[in-house]
Image (cartoon, coloured by chain):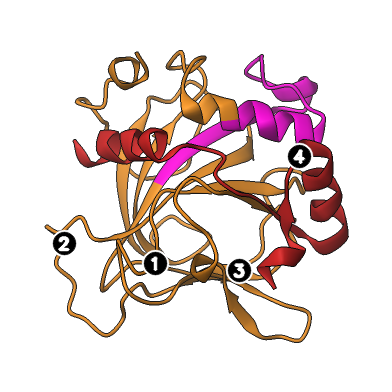
């Protein structure tokens, strides 16, 4: 099911969003970037 | 550096509607207080007029969204539509975090909503989480399929919500376990007092 939503470039992402209503771009942020944001939040 | 610019050490803890020129804040929402949608979550709101996020990973996602939607959020008011980009870090604690089923678009002229997963089901929490309702009326859990760092978006009229994260355990609000997402949303500008 998730395969229907996965896009590999920005045009495909836009098209999936229009056609299916949901679009997914895998690994947009790296694990380090994601963890950095999470750590910033947790400092509060 | 992104981390220093955010100045996370001085959040304003206050609830209520968002308004133009408001300070960034950290908020805890429990139930339906001052919200359209009932929820149990923490939210750190990052307004575009307060910080320079130019080189942050969040801003990269904002630029991606702008390209997808063909808008420009370089200025605070997007394309003169009186919208602004509200970036939020959301935390749904294990054992308690939820958001009721809803559709979007009531406060942003019907633009799609963009999110980035910062947690992984099976690692940061065990069960349930974010879902969409498909055309057949079935609830489809998105968190089963997304990994940390995945960016996803949905159009505003899709029913969605967050089923109570780890609803079979008693919540420990001192624990960092739970579901984390970045929400890059567009909101109408409201001018406060």
Q: Residue at x 39, y 66 (%)?
A: B121
Chain A visual colour: red
Find the magenta span and give its range.
B61-89
Answer left or right for B130 relative to B63: left
Residue B111 drawn above or below residue B136? above
Residue A22 belongs to magenta span: no
Chain under numbered label 3: B
| Mark 4 surroundings: few (<14), some (14-19) or many (≥20) residues within 10 A | few
Do callouts 4 and 3 mark residues in contact (Cβ within 8 Å)? no
Nearer mark to the viewer, of 1 and 3: 1
Q: Quadrant of the N terminus of chain B?
A: top left
Q: Which residue is mark 3?
A: B160
> Which mark sits nearer the N-terminus, 3 or 2?
3
Nearer mark to the viewer, of 2 and 1: 1
| Mark 2 surroundings: few (<14), some (14-19) or many (≥20) residues within 10 A | few
Chain B visual colour: orange
Alpha carbons under labels 3 and 2: distance apart: 25 Å
> Which mark sits nearer the N-terminus, 1 or 3?
1
Q: Which residue is mark 2?
A: B173
Q: Which residue is mark 1?
A: B121
Nearer mark to the viewer, of 1 and 4: 4
**Quadrant in the rendering for residue B145:** bottom right
**In the rendering, which numbered label is found on residue A9?**
4
Answer left or right for B37 relative to B154: left
Helix, strand or loop under label 3: strand
Alpha carbons under labels 2 and 4: distance apart: 39 Å
């Amino acid at each position: 099911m998730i395969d229907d939503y996965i896009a590999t470039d920005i045009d495909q992402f836009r098209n999936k969003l229009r056609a299916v209503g949901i679009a997914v771009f895998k690994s947009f942020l790296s694990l380090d970037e994601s963890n950095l944001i999470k750590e910033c939040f947790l400092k509060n | 550096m992104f981390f220093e610019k955010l100045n996370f050490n001085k959040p304003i803890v206050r609830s209520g509607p968002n308004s133009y020129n408001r300070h960034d804040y950290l908020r805890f929402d429990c139930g339906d207080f001052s919200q359209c949608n009932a929820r149990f979550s923490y939210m750190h709101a990052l307004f575009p007029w307060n910080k320079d996020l130019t080189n942050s990973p969040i801003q990269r996602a904002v630029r991606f969204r702008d390209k997808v939607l063909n808008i420009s959020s370089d200025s605070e008011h997007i394309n003169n539509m009186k919208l602004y980009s509200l970036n939020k870090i959301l935390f749904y604690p294990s054992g308690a975090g939820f958001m009721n089923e809803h559709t979007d678009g009531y406060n942003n002229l019907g633009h799609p909503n963009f999110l980035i997963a910062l947690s992984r089901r099976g690692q940061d929490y065990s069960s349930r989480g974010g879902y969409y309702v498909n055309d057949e009326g079935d609830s489809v859990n998105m968190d089963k399929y997304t990994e940390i760092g995945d960016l996803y978006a949905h159009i505003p009229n899709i029913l969605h919500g967050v089923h109570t994260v780890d609803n079979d355990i008693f919540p420990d609000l001192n624990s960092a376990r739970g579901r984390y997402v970045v929400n890059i949303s567009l909101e109408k500008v409201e001018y406060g007092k």
